Image (cartoon, rainbow, N blue to C red):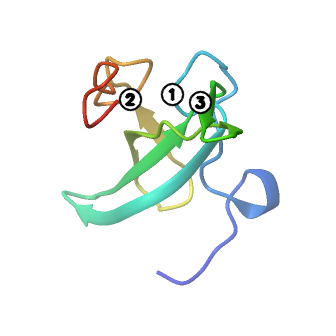
Amino acid sequence: MGKSKGPLTMGAVLEPHPDENRFDSAHVGVSDVYFSDGLYWMWYFGGDRQVLEVGKFQAKGIQMLPGCAVSRDGINWVRLEGSHRGAFLSPGQPGEFDA
C-alpha cells in the first residue's frame, strides 16, 4: 500500500480522542500495524490530559497506555474499546514499576 492521506487533521488516520476522559485524549502514536484476516490492526499508545510532575517540570500525557484500532483500507480506522478508559491495560499502582 502506498502512502495516502487520511481523512483527519493534516492527513492523519488517527488523532487524539475528543472525549477528554479517555486514555488517548492528549496524543496518540503508532506502535505497530499489521495485516491479518482481511484487516489492518494498529496497536498504538495514547496519553491523557493529566498533568504529572517530572522532576521540576510538569508534563501532560506522559502516562501512556496501549490501544488498538482496526481498518479494512488502512485509512479509516475504528478504535477497539478496552476496559481502562478505552485502553487495554491500566497503569500500575503508585510506587509500582509501571505506575
Q: Residues within 10 Å of mark 1 (few under 14, many from 20)?
A: many
Examine the rendered structure and indicate whether residue 11 appears above or below residue 23. below
Q: Is residue 15 left or right of residue 9?
A: left
* Circles 1, 2 touching at the beta carbon (< 8 Å): yes
State the separation of the CA atoms marked 1 and 2.
6 Å
Q: Quadrant of residue 21?
A: top right
Examine the rendered structure and indicate whether residue 67 appears above or below residue 14. above
Read off the residue under disc 3: 48
Nearest to viewer (mark 2 / mark 3)? 3
Q: Residue at x 48, y 36 (%)?
A: 63
Of the residues shown, which amino acid type is indicated by label 1?
Answer: Phe
Read off the residue under disc 2: 87
| Dot 2 or dot 3, earlier in sequence | 3
**Residue farthest to the left, as pictured:** 37
* Circles 3, 1 touching at the beta carbon (< 8 Å): yes
**How far across and how far down the image is residue 74, in percent?**
48, 62
Which of the two residues, 93 or 21, is positioned nearer the viewer here?
93
**How far across and how far down the image is residue 66, in percent?**
37, 41
Q: Is residue 44 left or right of residue 97?
A: right
Of the residues shown, which amino acid type is indicated by label 3?
Answer: Asp
**How far across and how far down the image is residue 48, in percent?**
59, 30
Q: Residues within 10 Å of mark 2 (few under 14, many from 20)?
A: many
Q: Residue at x 70, y 68 (%)?
A: 5
Which of the two residues, 54 or 18, is positioned nearer the viewer here?
54
Of the residues shown, which amino acid type is indicated by label 2?
Answer: Ala
